[in-house]
Structure formats: C-alpha cells, structure tokens
Image (tube, coloured by chain):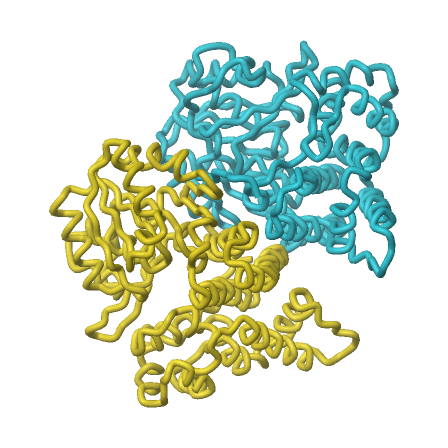
Chain colours: A yellow, B cyan
Amino acid sequence: MNPFRFHNPTTLYYGRGQIEAHLAEEVTKYGRRVLLVYGGGSIKRFGLYDKVTRILREAGVTWWELPGVEPNPRLTTVRKGIALCRDHDIQLILAVGGGSVLDCAKGIAMGAKFDGDVWDIYLKKAKPTDALPLGTILTLAATGSEMNAGGVITNWETKEKIGASSPYTFPRFSFCDPENTYTVPRDQTVYGACDMLAHCFEHYFHEPAHAPLQDRLIESVIQTIIEYTPKALEHPDDYDARETLMYCSTMALNGMINMGMQGDWACHAIEHEISAFYDIPHGGGLAIVFPNWMDYVLDTDPARFAQLGERVFGIDRNGRPEAQVARETVDRVRAFYRSIGAPQRLADYNIGDEALERMAQQAVRFGPIGHFKKLEAADVLDILRRCL
Amino acid sequence: MNPFRFHNPTTLYYGRGQIEAHLAEEVTKYGRRVLLVYGGGSIKRFGLYDKVTRILREAGVTWWELPGVEPNPRLTTVRKGIALCRDHDIQLILAVGGGSVLDCAKGIAMGAKFDGDVWDIYLKKAKPTDALPLGTILTLAATGSEMNAGGVITNWETKEKIGASSPYTFPRFSFCDPENTYTVPRDQTVYGACDMLAHCFEHYFHEPAHAPLQDRLIESVIQTIIEYTPKALEHPDDYDARETLMYCSTMALNGMINMGMQGDWACHAIEHEISAFYDIPHGGGLAIVFPNWMDYVLDTDPARFAQLGERVFGIDRNGRPEAQVARETVDRVRAFYRSIGAPQRLADYNIGDEALERMAQQAVRFGPIGHFKKLEAADVLDILRRCL
C-alpha cells in the first residue's frame, strides 16, 4: 500500500430509533440556530420532516430552511444557502436527504466560512480553511456522502460538474435509519446501488500497490451489494435488505476499505461530464460508463479483473487463460447491471453523439484522468462512443 | 445488525517515512511537555528511541520518561506514570511500543485527569470524564490498541487483569511503520498474529444479528492473517508481509469491521484470568483457549462455523452435514495455530490445574461471560480443563 494518513471524525448512528434518541443531543452541541437543507419534498410526504422539526422544536432550536435542492445540486442553490447562513448567523447545517442534499450542504458549509466565491474552491483556485458544522440524516443509500468530506456541485451556466473536499466538511454526525429508505422508488434504488458499486470499482482498480486486505474488503462490499440489491428491489420494506444496502453505501466511500490505495476515478470524471451536459442521474451514468471503461482498459491488468471474477462472481479459473476469465468478469458485471434494470446505453437517456467531443475535452481539463490507466481526451472519446 | 453509534477519531499514519514527516507536527499540536512511555528497551537497541527523541528535541519538546512497561502492564507502572504527569504538568503522552505500552499509556492518560484511584475505573466503580491526549508509535502488530480506546491492566497484588475503555482514550494519532516490526522476535510475531486473529473470532461469533457485510469484512481479515503470518515468519524483513500483518492488527480492533455487532469476548475474559495468574503472553493464551472454546460451543450454531470454514478455509460443503463442516472448521483453526508454532496447551507454559477453579470463578465475577453462548463458572472450568 502507499503511505497514508487516515482520519474520519464523523459520528455515525445506524438503525431504528436513533434519530429520536440522539438527534437533539447532537444538534445542540453546535448551537440552536440551524439551517435545514432538503430536496424535493419527499421528506414531507413520508413524515420525516415532521419528525425532525418536532425534535428541533422540543430542543429549543430555531431553524431556517433551504428546500428544493436538485439532484445534481446546483451552484446557484449553494449560493442561496450561503446567504441564508450569513443572514441568520447559522451555527449548524442539518442536511436531510440523499447525496445531492448532503453535497449541497457541504458546499454551503465551506462557502459560509470562505471569504470569496465558493466556486473557486471547486475550481481548485482556493482552499477552504474552515467550514460551518454539518450534520446529516440520510434518506438514500448511494453516495456515501454521510461519512466523507467530499461533494459534487454543478455549475449549470458553464456546464461544469466538479467535486471538492476539505478536512472541514466531514459531517460531524450522520443518522442512517434504513426505514427512511423504504419509500425510495425503484429507479433511485437502482441508481444508488450503481453508485456504491462504482465507488468500489474505483477503489479496486488501483495503481499496482500491494494491498491484499483492502482488495478483500472491497470485494466484500461488492459481493454484498450484488447479493442485496435484488432483495431490496423485490421487497422495498425489507429492513435487513435496506439496512445492508445503506451500510454498503457508507462503507464504500468512507475511506475504510481503501486506505493506502490510489483508486482510478476516471469513470466518475467521465460521468460528471455526461450529467453536467444532460443532467442525468449520476448512478445511471456510472452504470453505462463502467462496463465500457472496463472493456477499454481490460488489457492493462487482466489479472486484477480475473481476481475480481474469481472471488466475487465465483468464476472457476480452472486452468483457463487469464484474459478469458477477465473477459468473463466484465460480462458478469454487465449482466448484473442488466439484471437490476440499470440503464445500459446513453441512448436510454436519448443522448446522441452531439457533445461527446466537448465532454471528452472537458473531462481532461485538469490533465489526464485515471490511475489504473491514464486516459487522454482521445481515450475518453473512445469510451464515450462505446457508451452510445 | 444492532443499532449502533460509531466514532473513531484517531488519525492514523501508515508506512515508511511518516514519523519523520509528521511526528513533530502532531506532537506539538498538544504542547511541548511530553511523557515518553516505552517498554523493555528494544526501541533503544533498534534505533527508534534515537529517531523519536531527535525529532522531539528538534521540535523544542521537553520530555520525561517512563521506561520498563511490562508485557501485561501493571497497575503499579500506571500509577508511576500518573505521578510523572502530575509532577511535570505533562500535555501529551507519547507511547512507543506494542499493545502493552499503549494500554499502560491509556491508563496513565485516564488516571492523570481522574480525581481518585485509577483502578476504580477498571473495576467499573468510576467513569472517567477526561484524559490526557495520547499519541502512539507502534512497534508490534497485535492488539489494535493504536486505533481504539481500550486497554488492559494487571493488578498483580490481587491477580486481576481487567480492561477499560472511554471516549477519551482513543489515541489522537498513531504512527505505524512496518519497518519498526522487522526485529520483532518469532514468538512475539506468532503471539501478535494469535491476538489479532482472536479479535476477529470474538467479533465473528456474535449474537444472531443480521450483518452480512460485517461477516465478510471479518472473514477478509482472518483470511489475510492466515495468508501473511507465515510470510512474515519466513522473511521477518519482508516489508509487504509486515505491513499487511500490521494493517490486519489495526483493522481487527478499530471497530470498523464489526459495527452493530455484539461479539462474544468470553475467550478474552478466560485468557485474562490465565495471564493474571501466570503472566503468560496474551496471544499465547488466546491460541490455547480459542480452539477449546470452539469445541465447547460448536453446537450452539454450527452454521456459523460452517460459513467460516467454507469462506475462509475453502472447505467444500458439497452436501455434507453442517455439523461435519463445522467440526472440520475447528480442526483447520487448530491446524493453523499449530502450523505457526503457537502454544497448544497450558502445559506448554507449565501450568497445571492448581488454580483453574479460582480462575473460573473470577472470570465470571461481573456475571456470565460470552454473547455467542453465555458461560457460567462451570462452563469456564470445563473449557479451562480442555486447555490443560
């Protein structure tokens, strides 16, 4: 493994009844002036808004609200939130929702304590030195944003979707109650599974670094996602299935399974271009990009693909050439995506080849992408064409 | 899984060169008056003492020393450390050594900020409300103490060996450089492997709780220990092998692989009695107790043993009765201990049956032990007799 520093200070609460038991205590550690950030209103339909605001009220907390955070949350919304924080001397941001809401809240937390344009942080022109405290209540198993410091924001004017991270944007606390995901629609459940699976793949296809335990930890998460996604789809209110998927999503991107590894992350960069141009669901985009990226990079290290195939999909190697096992592994990945009804081509979102070249150029604007295999604009374009 | 709260604030540094690059910066966050705690002097023989004190000196740090911490660290030594902290207004405890040194330092950290007898904390008569900051430099892959809040202390006068833990005793930082374990003797390497393996087993044999990802994470660590211990024994200066074992030891007991699970922990309680009476190495004691405990509890849930056997040891179940596969699993565990030269019977330490009854009584003094199967004094005695 590479030398590493690991620090994840988030306090994580999992399971039924934890919000009722501990939310007031966690919130009031930081103050009594809260900005409540949420999305399209499903938290109102399903009672979570009422539960949370009742707890805040009983704890003597005053809150302001930023509703309507979009999937692929927008810079304009982040800016609205920053203004609210400044106008009302907010002490804690409480994000209630999925990864988009949490990512938006991280942007607000950084921006509220940053003396300049928050977008400069995403453009890597500036570094945050502080952030407002942030707590979260998760309603979607997908991004892992509940236990990491990163977040992705879209600048719709410039068609740029960029991530940023800082030591100050780890949620101070996160509440993960699987029951809050019972009402997640089928397609969102699928996208969530594709997203967490993509995080695992990004880690797994790392630079050649010796990390045998990390490999197995990642394989464990992949296997569990593959086993439990169909269960959650079949029985949306199966507590164990929802809990297991939620827990996979947290573990897939909280840094615990990939210490000392430099993951690849090209597919995320490519997908960010697709959804920056077409505003499609991130998980859906990843499901399209990943198998095609795998086809493209397979020859870089077939042994890694073969290891994945043998350990996760139980492919019998039995003296077969490594390249053949590797090939079969990618077929199995594709088959899994198909089996859960994930999108398979850009055409599924009515996306043609109009913008592929601009997307490929923009994907490499900070330099070549990917660590397992370095990709230039021409490589990205080739992969995008395979996605059509 | 059970509802849980997880919080592990330790900053972990792994790999070559990290001490040189980051120790001064971490230490001076807490002050410039340090208590340096270490063991029998191997850190002097192998140059680590010189390296660390040079870094402290160059950072303008003044330090006092508590050398000579014993394996199975003693209450008397903890008390000595507490007095030093008070006399010299210590701001940070820096523990350099293996689990014993770290556990001793945790006792000192709690005691220095506790207005009463520190042993009362271990006896659960008092709860700490604060502790001095603690940093560690690890020299032995074994206990996981570098990234958890627990520590075990022996009161030699009363023949009691008891663990304690608090939210304040997580090391603020820990440096794990595998090169610092190259000179660990063969028997200590074996004991370390037995200890980390025991932590995994304690987690794995949990109450019936649905935790499929955690099961796989634990299996991953077990598999990696089994694969890499022989490599480290064969080539003590194999960086990758030492690093992998060190990393397994950290992951086995930092809470990351067993969230929401109540492990068993009866074997630890039993072993603590053995080493409280006979001062034998903890890892050696665990290697003796575990297979005999497994024999004793096998019928409680053969499916769990069979799952371990199939996934970790690759036992082909092939229509065989579960009980038979479970039986074979325990045989394979025993065979692994034998293969690395771990002790197999109390007789290996010249321990007879003189004190077994007292040990069994004392093991259950806070109530029955074990969660996978609850053990009363008679059960413990039976297991101890099997260990003879």
Residue B123 horizontal/vertical position (percent): 58, 15
**B24 left or right, relative to A38:** right
- Along the line of sight, the residue nearer the viewer: A112 or A124: A112
Residue B168 horizontal/vertical position (percent): 45, 28
Q: Which residue is drawn at 39% across and 25% down?
A: B91
Q: In which quarter of the image is residue B368?
A: top right
Q: Residue at x 66, y 39 (%)?
A: B206
Above or below B214: residue B112: above
**B276 left or right, relative to A123:** right
Residue A273 horizontal/vertical position (percent): 34, 76
- Along the line of sight, the residue nearer the viewer: A265 or A78: A78
- Along the line of sight, the residue nearer the viewer: A323 or A384: A384
Q: Quadrant of residue A331?
A: bottom right
Q: Is residue A194 visible?
A: yes
**A250 left or right, relative to B303:** left
Q: How many dots with numbers?
A: 0
Q: Residue at x 39, y 51 (%)?
A: A138
**A296 left or right, relative to A105:** right
| Quarter of the figure with the N terminus of chain B | top right
Q: Can residue B340 be seen in this view?
A: no
Q: Quadrant of residue B139?
A: top right
Above or below A332: residue B211: above
- Along the line of sight, the residue nearer the viewer: A131 or A4: A131
Residue A349 horizontal/vertical position (percent): 38, 81
Residue at far bottom of view: A353
Above or below B11: residue B241: below
| Quarter of the figure with the C terminus of chain B | top right
